[in-house]
Image (cartoon, grey):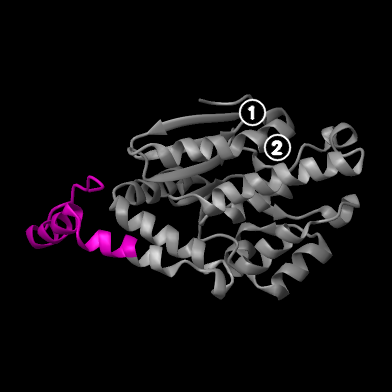
Amino acid sequence: MSDPGLLYAVSGALARITISQPAKMNAMAFHMWQALPGLVAQAVADPAVRAIVLEGDGEKAFCAGADISQFGAQRSDPDAVAAYDRAVAEGMSALAQAGKPTIAVIRGICFGGGFGLALACDIRLARADARFRVPAARLGLGYGFEGVSLLARKLGPDATADILISARILDAAEAERLGVVAKVWSDDAFADESGAYLDAVAANAPLTLMAAKAALVELAKLEAARDTATVAQMVAACFGSADYKEGQAAFKEKRTPQFRGV
């Protein structure tokens, strides 16, 4: 199931959610924020899916942020602002809390809410033309606590202060240096290299991927709130699985393992 503005497709072991509003640089409309958690849940529930890929439609933008043209109608009074902010927070949380790894594939503009969506993913892959910015200070918008917290957890307080207070644009090289993205490839190499990266993730053991994601989710919580017992159970399930035996056998036989998630 897709939504106007968000396209959903499964290719092999990857679920792809494409932000598709290219006429507005893939800006996120209110209904798109609302639809995102359902699409993520659909991917998590699909046993064939091992990881979730978030990308933008076309070559110019990953996501330019929230659709500002809606602000007059959608953020015109305190109740409307609260509803909009809740939809944004739930969309971000869906990616961050998903039971399977989430990977942002970034070309071109990655601004505002798009920057937040990318950071909500576990891994970010960027083309060399990618540009990153949180322009709230240039628009007079308040940047909510959850958004600031996400930036600070991923990038640290100093980089977060710089990005929010200066509202400047980061190129892909600086984004990689600051830890905004994990990998940057040239325009010519990006399709092949990012594709190979995603294929490698899709070939990995599903139970191991889910256990790693569960640990990352718990790590983002306050220590007293962490459910490490569930993570330990998931790790134990990996060692008790047929996939663990297959991984050992494939290593000994010098072949590619064929994991089944059991």
Where residue 64 sits, quadrant-wise, is top right
Mark 1 lies on residue: 5
Residue range (magenta):
233-262
Q: Is 199 placed left or right of 174 in the picture?
A: left
Give the camera-side residue of 35 and 107. 35
Give the camera-side residue of 163 and 153. 153
Residue located at (48% from left, 43% from top): 53
Give the number of marks.
2
Neighbours of disc 1 within 10 Å: few (<14), some (14-19), many (20+) = some
Earlier-in-chain disc, 1 versus 2: 1
**Is 40 rendered above or below residue 253?**
above
- Percent position (x, y) of residue 205? 28, 53
Residue located at (13% from left, 53% from top): 255
- Principal secondary structure, stretch drawn in magenta: helix
- Percent position (x, y) of residue 215? 44, 64
**Is 24 rendered above or below residue 154?**
above
Where residue 96 sits, quadrant-wise, is bottom right
- Residue 254 belongs to the span the image colors magenta: yes
Neighbours of disc 2 within 10 Å: few (<14), some (14-19), many (20+) = many
Q: Is residue 102 visible?
A: yes
Residue located at (63% from left, 49% from top): 92
Q: Is 10 placed left or right of 89 in the picture?
A: left
Element under disc 2: loop
Q: Is residue 108 visible?
A: no
Give the camera-side residue of 26 and 152. 152
* Labelled disc at residue 219: none
Mark 2 lies on residue: 28
Q: Identity of the amino acid at label 1?
A: Gly
